[in-house]
Image (cartoon, grey):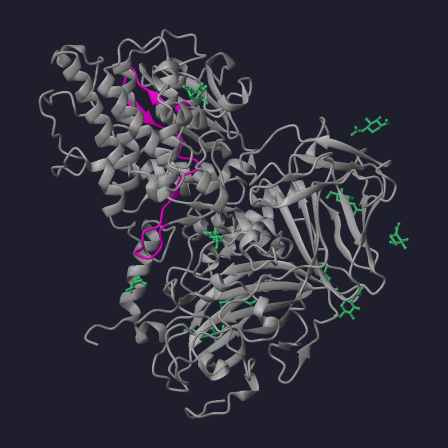
Amino acid sequence: MAGTARRPLLVLLLVAGAAAIAESKPYAPADRVLLNCGSATDSLDGDGRKWMADTNDDTWLTDSGKSSLMMAADRMDNGLPSTIPYMTARVFTMEAVYNFTVNPRDRHWVRLHFYPSSYNGLAPDGFHFSVTTSTGLTLLRNFSAYTYAKALSQAFIIREFSLPPTPAGFLSITFTPMPVGNDTYAFVNGIEVISMPDLFSDPATMVGFADQTVDIAGAALQTMYRFNVGGMYIPPSNDSGLTRQWYDDTPYVLGPVQGVIYRAGPHFQLKYPSEVAEYAAPPEVYLGTRSMGSDPRLNQNYNLTWTMPVDCNFTYVARLHFCELLLSRPNQRAFDIYVNNKTAQSDADVIGMTTEKGVPMYKDFAVSVADEPGDEAMWVALHPSVALRPQFYDATLNGLEVFKINGTDGNLAGPNPDPSRLLAKAELGAGDEGVPRTHGHRNMGTVMGGTAGGAAALGLVAAICVEKKSRELAAAGGSHTSGWLPLFHSHTSNKSSGHLAANLAGMCRHFSFADIKVATKNFSESLVIGVGGFGKVYRGVVDGDTKVAIKRSNPSSEQGVHEFQTEVEMLSKLRHRHLVSLIGFCEDAGEMILVYDYMEHGTLREHLYMGGKPPLSWRHRLDICIGAARGLHYLHTGAKYTIIHRDVKTTNILVDGDWVAKVSDFGLSKSGPTTVNQTHVSTMVKGSFGYLDPEYFRRQQLTDKSDVYSFGVVLFEVLLARPALDPALPREQVSLADYALLCQRNGTLKDVIDPAIKDQIAPECLKKFADTAEKCIGEQGIERPSMGDVLWNLEFAMQLQDAFEGGSCGGRRPAGEGSGTAGRSAAALEPSNSNGSAASVTTLETSSTTRPPHEACIIVEENDDEVANSAAFSQLVRPTGR
Ligand SMILES: *[C@@H]1O[C@H](CO)[C@@H](O)[C@H](O)[C@H]1NC(C)=O
Ligand SMILES: *[C@@H]1O[C@H](CO)[C@@H](O)[C@H](O)[C@H]1NC(C)=O
Ligand SMILES: *[C@@H]1O[C@H](CO)[C@@H](O)[C@H](O)[C@H]1NC(C)=O
Ligand SMILES: *[C@@H]1O[C@H](CO)[C@@H](O)[C@H](O)[C@H]1NC(C)=O
Ligand SMILES: *[C@@H]1O[C@H](CO)[C@@H](O)[C@H](O)[C@H]1NC(C)=O
Ligand SMILES: *[C@@H]1O[C@H](CO)[C@@H](O)[C@H](O)[C@H]1NC(C)=O
Ligand SMILES: *[C@@H]1O[C@H](CO)[C@@H](O)[C@H](O)[C@H]1NC(C)=O
Ligand SMILES: *[C@@H]1O[C@H](CO)[C@@H](O)[C@H](O)[C@H]1NC(C)=O
Ligand SMILES: *[C@@H]1O[C@H](CO)[C@@H](O)[C@H](O)[C@H]1NC(C)=O
Ligand SMILES: *[C@@H]1O[C@H](CO)[C@@H](O)[C@H](O)[C@H]1NC(C)=O
């Protein structure tokens, strides 16, 4: 296929005669039903979409719901994007049918939403069921939403299908409970049935078989992945009326070389072709791209690759979306496209195919995934076309979707994942020879959640095919025996049992299991000081008299594995006066135990309310806030890359015997963006209600400003001495953030502060403190100050307090004060800011607008190994002297 610059590319021409249109009109679906199952009222979800009660007589549920029960979830998981439709469910004990009247000419999205919680005491693992349609399709078979959610570390699962037109004019969806033990229940939280434009009329090219195509026009499809490549999460409400969700592709890019991201400027005009492709993807997708980078040598030596686990024994369609944003002549940028290591198309030239800049297009490639080791994932790879000698050796992609095609028996269902195999799989993904490796740990994030949220929620993942490999590895004496920590630096240490030990050696101490047993009096219940999802925390003593806190992970809690590892990794690298230190760990006997400094005075919260402790003085409180701010500021800026805590709250701020505040619990931390043009990490929402940044919640984009928001709530909590959320209070007061903001804005804040400290606060200090807290909980991240600014302002507030108390600060500081302000004179109203440079009193007001956006890099989650690999890799492929 090598050719000259003028080779005939017209075969691929998708958009001949494309009409230039400035903007696409939103698609208006003929049928649009969103059912909030098990609810008696209509409600709006977090995106403002209206969900209807499914109780309306027999409009939808054919037996008027006689065979079913309406139930509310027993608990609300922090990972839910919205209470609607997840907090209510319809639970079936026998076969039940939802019947929808549909436009016979339209294709339809069918989306099923599942939140595997316990309902009225019914255990979440008791639900196994199949879902079939009146058109002969099996959407789910013996499906366990619980198993999926657990395997993916997700709170909820969404399954999206695109069903071909049903000439009968109705579509019924049948839920059939499957017996497991004595339980036979089915459930569903939400059902969407929505018309869609015909996006699948053209056949897909069969990869590896010249001239063969796969007809998808009549097929039922399940969405496996949908990425806004090089872009951010796009919610259903922003998808040109098509209600799809587009996720950030970053976790699926095979590292460490992840290319560069480019976004067109605000005035860039897309020219959508006049056909249906108008709705192929929203403008957001086409306006941003990931390309290989500017170094031609480097580009020639690697493939820009995405890998996505899928179920075997199915045929898949990969839809690649392109739009040239920079170049305008043919053969400026041409590249080869590989799907599952086979050439899907050589010499692809986007301008050659579209004829001009700014014209969106897509290409569909079909590939069968068999039940063979190494074949359980979709690989999409791009490489510059050397044969064509284009002007730039580069490749680019704007969007990527992967759909599963129904089998001839109408089946779309894959097996339930096996969580332990899934872990093994994530590890295997990290070790193929000759390919730049992703780190085991990062891959874990990929499969188990993180940004993968989306894809995970779409319910992909087939772990079943790895069985053989994991058995081989296990036989080789691999590190799988512990079962719950297999991903930690996996590819370096199959053979050593103490791989964690090796990795952390020199950073902290290794305890034997016997040491730990002695320290905790054989895990005496009387020494338990905390219980979490990961297991229990014990008070203990080592070396005769050193008090420690010992966190013993419950080996059966798979959910915490990822968080646990994150915490070890973070803590072992981070040392700071205001962060809880890891003293050591124990990895013997299949146990995973962490040993921390003991925090004599417990959590900040118990000294504010509901702890039965005498109320802390205002100075103490302010001092603790300053310490915590210092710890967070260090997390954000002190390490090599930004670390976002993600769960800042008063129970994660601990106080030691000298009243020094320490930030704890990095289990949810994420490395933040480190590059210039990327200011957020897109991720599944985690954290605690009441403290959650609304922007993060809405857009699933994590920034350091999400921590600033939570910290603002902490500041108000310290001032008002009440919980962040208190459902027992009158409605306007339930949320502390909302209530404090109202009071602050109408000038009544001083009336609601904790009576215990009311008379101690200097008015100017209160003003500075409250203004700072208010700015922290600004609606938009961009409006909020940085943690450094917050710190500076709190220190300033402390000085105002000092001045008010007449310069007698030295003697009145809390015992063990150490935040760094102690020695500073109260008269010095110009403290240095956190960077040590002089700052004026107006820092807070100006800095958030004048400071440049966050620094960035292309690899979002990285660690030392990867950085090293990546550096080595670059040296290898980029010869000097070029
Ligand atoms: C669904 O509704 C259609 C008519 O709207 C009816 O013909 C069909 O029998 C119904 N299906 C079931 C299972 O009730
Ligand atoms: C469904 O899955 C459960 C758990 O994996 C299993 O025990 C049961 O036998 C399966 N039922 C059928 C009909 O396959
Ligand atoms: C299933 O039901 C039988 C009869 O009611 C009972 O004896 C048995 O213990 C139950 N099994 C489980 C696992 O609950
Ligand atoms: C959704 O669209 C609106 C209006 O175009 C825009 O302001 C908003 O930022 C978009 N949200 C996301 C998450 O893209
Ligand atoms: C895939 O198909 C083969 C051959 O029909 C079968 O042996 C294998 O069990 C199937 N694998 C799965 C995971 O269904
Ligand atoms: C890119 O991928 C193709 C298909 O897997 C492979 O043949 C080729 O060697 C790869 N190129 C590089 C530089 O890795
Ligand atoms: C593609 O090639 C890579 C690297 O050789 C290999 O690890 C992977 O399993 C292959 N993928 C498929 C689907 O064959
Ligand atoms: C599933 O797909 C095949 C091939 O794409 C098609 O022939 C068949 O009619 C589809 N539907 C069912 C219910 O099998
Ligand atoms: C970041 O964006 C600016 C302007 O938008 C551009 O000049 C610069 O090259 C971009 N940097 C990277 C690494 O993409
Ligand atoms: C200020 O707002 C709070 C909270 O809504 C309310 O309770 C209080 O009555 C308001 N006070 C005034 C003077 O408006």
- The kind of secondary structure the magenta stretch mainly shows is loop
Q: Identify the residue at image location x=29%, y=62%.
A: 872
Question: Could you say which quadrant of the image residue 254 lies in?
Answer: bottom left
Is 79 on the left or on the right of 465, as rendered? left
Which stretch is magenta? 650-679
Is residue 654 in the magenta section? yes
Q: Identify the residue at image location x=81%, y=43%.
A: 178
Name above or below for residue 803 compared with residue 367.
Answer: above
Is 176 on the left or on the right of 260, as rendered? right
Is 122 on the left or on the right of 153, as rendered? right
Q: Identify the residue at image location x=58%, y=44%.
A: 48
Name above or below for residue 6 compared with residue 38.
Answer: below
Q: Position of residue 626 (x, y in %)?
A: 26, 25
Quadrant of the drawing holding the C terminus: bottom left
Residue nearer the viewer, 455 or 427: 455
Q: Is residue 579 visible?
A: no
